[in-house]
Each structure stands twice: as structure tokens, then as C-alpha cells.
Image: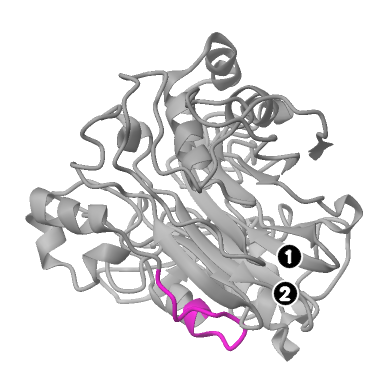
Amino acid sequence: MPKIHSRFAVIASIVSLSISFFSLPIAAQTASNITLPPVAKGAIRIATFNAALNRKSDGQLVKDLQAGDDQAKRIATIVQLVAPDILLLNEVDYSNGEAAKILFEDYLNKPQAPKLAPEKDLFKYYYTSSVNTGVPSGYDLNLNGRSNDADDGWGYGAFPGQYGMAVFSKQPIQTDAIRTFQMFKWSSMPEAKRPFVTDKATGEKSFFHSDALWQELRLSSKSHWDVPIQIGESTLHVIASHPTPPVFDGLEDRNGCRNHDEIRLIKDYVEGDSIAGYIVDDNGKAGPLDQTASFVIVGDLNSDPVDGSGISKGIIDLLASKRVASKTIPSSQGAIEANAKQGQTNLKQKGKPESDTADFNDKSTGNLRVDFVLPSSDCTVVNSGVFWPTVSELSDVDRELIEASDHRLVWIDIRLP
């Protein structure tokens, strides 16, 4: 069941972006070189962060958080420094909503930097719900002769809810209007990229999954959410997801195909043209997002428009959508520094290193731009960035701060129409 919560009592003090220096409880309490610009008047800050708060067994993340987890403290420190109004965290194990609840109460809304001036809670509301990862399908989805592997869940996972997600907000979440697409069938998408294999001897092509199984497969590897949030007298639809990585498969490229179509579902949903009538949510409501609605697409979409192993057309088409204000590309100096220092595959890539949002294996993958905050074209982009400090900026604080996740927090400041 979904978990939607509000909070009005002041719990702890949090970071203010008007303060240029902060200290960390997990390192020497000294001034930091890390600074971020304050949010402009009338704007709101929206962020996405793959926090890598996943564990190998069900309930382990909850136990770690209850005991006091250094990784979660570092994640919370980063979030408090950026201080977004709205945040999507990817890779937070679901555990029936307990992990998100503890993060909300004991990490995000408790000061990780005690020398800062006190403020009200960073967030007052959060939303989380079930996802497809680790939910047993009962089928042999990867055709290896077994039906109980992590790869045989409706989404890859060792247990139900692994790699889940949660939305946190300063402003009220419109609970009754939330739409989820966890159960949406892949085969329901017109002209879906159904995985196929080619016989090496004959060149004959055949579908990887049987027709019966294809009719059962779910598209979303986790879930796709439309979470409306009340911003003054306006509503902003937070379109949250975490498509599967387009790797860890075979020549059939089933994960690459799925990643492409998970991203295409986002595009079709926000564009709402004649083809989008196929979209039906988990409550049976058909149709895309209203074309007058303002939105922001957030998430680790696991696809770089220039580099990497994915079918890039999906993310390229989304960025080019007339409904998306995609001209502003968040960047950082830390990504440039990391690119030069790490070298190897990074030096062979075509994309601009300053726009990278994830630090992957330098020998095989390299750093990529896979995390996105994409406002609708009716919004005005005021500022943006990627939280990727340089070595000098981390010199007097916890050096492991940036290692809390292999992804970096991405943020954009916007004004609603």
C-alpha cells in the first residue's frame, strides 16, 4: 500500500542555502569550501538523487538506519546542503515504507551539520509505494532454466521492494490524485521494442519471450509515478521513475529494449498525443497527463543521450519533446576534474564531462549523464547544477561524502507559469 505522510511539528534544524559554510558530524567540524547558490525569489528547487541505499536482504536497510548508518548520514548531508523543495530518492528499499519513514524523520529532517543556524523541517511530506523489483513473476524471464532468480522478478531484485524510491516535499502532496503505473503491461505499448534473437546459422529472427509470457510482462522495472504537489495555487506533477539499466542481458538486449520503452512511456505520458491513449494506470484510469499541466520529470533514467550502452533514441526523443524544457543541462566542476583524473573510458566519450551525473567503472563504462530533472516547457529554468564537489572543496570535510553513492544529486530551480 502507498505511504503518504505529512508533518507539521518542528523536529530538527536544517541547512540554509544562504549559509556558505557547514560542518559534518562524521568528520572534523571545520568550515567547508562547498557552496551553492540560494534559490531565487519565487522559484522552487527540485532534485533527484540515486542514493544507493539498497541492501542485499529484505529489512536490512531498516535495521541499518535504526542503528545509525554513516552512508545515510552522508546522503542526508548532501540533501540538506542542496535543500530542495522537492526530492526523488532512487534506490531506497521499500520495506513496506519503513525505510522512507526513518529517512524522513531521523536523517533528512535531523541536522547532519550541528553548527548551522536552526530552521524548520526540510520536508513536511513524503510518498512511497510498492515497486516491481523482486516481486516474483513465477516465470523464467531470463530463460536460464530457473524461475526463482533475482532476474525472474517483474523487476530485477533479490526481494520485493529492493531498489525502491520515495518522493519528499516541503509542499502538500495531492494524495487523491496520485497515479501509478506499476502493473502496466509492456505489450500494451504500441510498437513496443519486444526483444528478439537471431539464429546465427539461418539469420531467422524469433521473439525472446513466448507470446503468452509477453502478454504478462510489466513494463516498469520499478514503477512510474505521477505525484501532484500543491505549490501555492498551482499544481506541479512530479513524474518519477527509475528505468532498468540497459545492460546485464544477452544479444536479445531485453534490458536495453525495456529501458528505451520505460523512457518512451514518460514521453508519451507528458506529450499526450493521439498515441498516448494506450496508457492506463493501476486504478484503471486511462489516458496521459493533461496537456495544460505543469510537470517535472525526475529520476535515474539509466540512459545517456550520447555515451553508454543504451538505446539512446529513447532519452534523445524525451529531451527533444516539445513539452520538455531541456535546453538547460546541469553541470559541475567536480565531474570535469573526475573525468581528467580517472581517464580510461572517460577520455573516449563524446559527451561533455561537466554534464556527467554518475561515476561508473572507468575501464568499461566511464562516467555518464543518466540522472535527470526535466521541467515542462511552460516553466522557467532559473538555475541548475550537479552536486559533484572538486577535491579542494572536499579537502576539509568528510572525504567519503561524495562516495556515499555512485550517482550525484542533480537539481534545478524553476518558476511555475
* For residue 49, above or below residue 348: above
Would residue 327 be counted in the magenta stretch?
A: yes
Image marks 1 and 2: residues in contact by CB distance under 8 Å: yes
**Could you tell me the amino acid type at mark 1?**
His
Q: In which quarter of the image is residue 247?
A: bottom left
Write the residue at 40% across / 66% down: 330
Q: Decide which of 135, 317 is in the foreground and name it.
A: 317
Measured in 3D between alpha carbons, the distance from the residue under mark 1 to the one under mark 2, in whole angstroms, is 6 Å
- Neighbourhood count class around disc 1 (C-alpha, 10 Å): few under 14, some 14–19, many 20 upward: many
Q: Decide which of 335, 77 is in the foreground and name it.
A: 77
Report which residue position mark 1 lands on: 237
Image coords of residue 72 (percent x, y): 48, 26
Would residue 106 be counted in the magenta stretch?
A: no
Report which residue position mark 2 lands on: 294
- In what element is the residue under mark 2? strand
Secondary structure character of the magenta stretch overall: loop
Image coords of residue 4 (percent x, y): 81, 40
Q: Is 162 positioned to the left or the right of 314 in the image?
A: right
Write the residue at 57% across / 80% down: 324
- In what element is the residue under mark 1? strand
Q: Decide which of 208, 200 is in the foreground and name it.
A: 208
The span shown in magenta is 318-329
